[in-house]
Image (tube, rainbow, N blue to C red):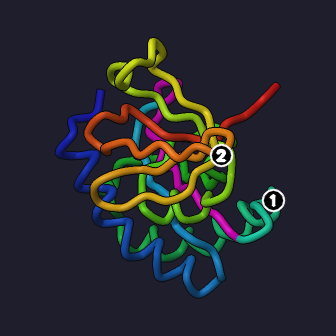
Amino acid sequence: MLGSFIINNVIEKVRPVAEGVLDGMGYELVDIEYKTLYGEKHLIIYIAKDGGVSLDDCEAVSNALDGPLDALDPTGEAPYCLDVSSPGLDRPFKTQRDFERNYGEAVEVKLYAPLGDRKEKLIVGTLVCRNEKNVTIDENGVQTVIENSKIALVRPYVEF
């Protein structure tokens, strides 16, 4: 198990290098994870671009990051696997940019507790906006404003 200090230290070392490489290639850095999977340490770089991310995009970014990350040595010579991926269809939003990228799209909002008269802790609707205080969702023409502190997560609504 990796300690949170080690994880945060690696991520903070990698972030500016990854952002620099990705900006130059036209990609957005969405998130970075450093964790143990199947007994090996993995550095996972999540990327986005307009129109979506392909396998070729992931390969190009991985190749572009190899040299700068080797020179940086963010893990202090500890071996790791570099993985580059799109965020995934149902990944919760973490940054303001995640929200902005999804304005006008269907989302699901999971709440810590039901709001007002509602019995459910899940709201599905169209994401209108998000600011430092709240998120606004359009539910069939009715706008619902939800304080950020009441929200457990917001993610794209994926219907199967």
Give the magenta-colored segment's residue range. Answer: 37-49
Task: Tell which tag, 1 or 2, sits nearer the viewer.
Answer: 2
Mark 2 burial class by Cα count in 10 Å: few <14, some 14-19, many 20+: few
Q: Which comes sooner in the sequence, label 1 or label 2?
A: 1
For mark 2, give the secondary structure.
loop
Task: Decide if residue 77 is on the left or right side of residue 40.
Answer: left
Identify the amino acid type marked 2.
Answer: Gly
Residue 151 at x, y = what percent?
Answer: 36, 35
Mark 1 near mark 2, Cβ–Cβ under 8 Å? no
Q: Residue 141: which numbered mark, if any? A: 2
Residue underneath mark 1: 54
Write down the quadrant of residue 70 in the picture. Answer: bottom left
Q: Main secondary structure of the magenta part?
A: strand
Residue 59 appears at what percent x and percent y?
Answer: 74, 62
Could you say whether the residue bearing mark 1 is in a helix, strand or loop?
loop
Near mark 1 (Cα within 10 A), the count class, few <14, some 14-19 or many ≥20, is few
Q: Residue at x 53, y 80 (%)?
A: 21
State yes or no: residue 87 in magenta: no
The correct choice, above or below, for 144 with respect to 115 in the image is: below
- The residue sitting at 23% across, 55% down in the picture is 9
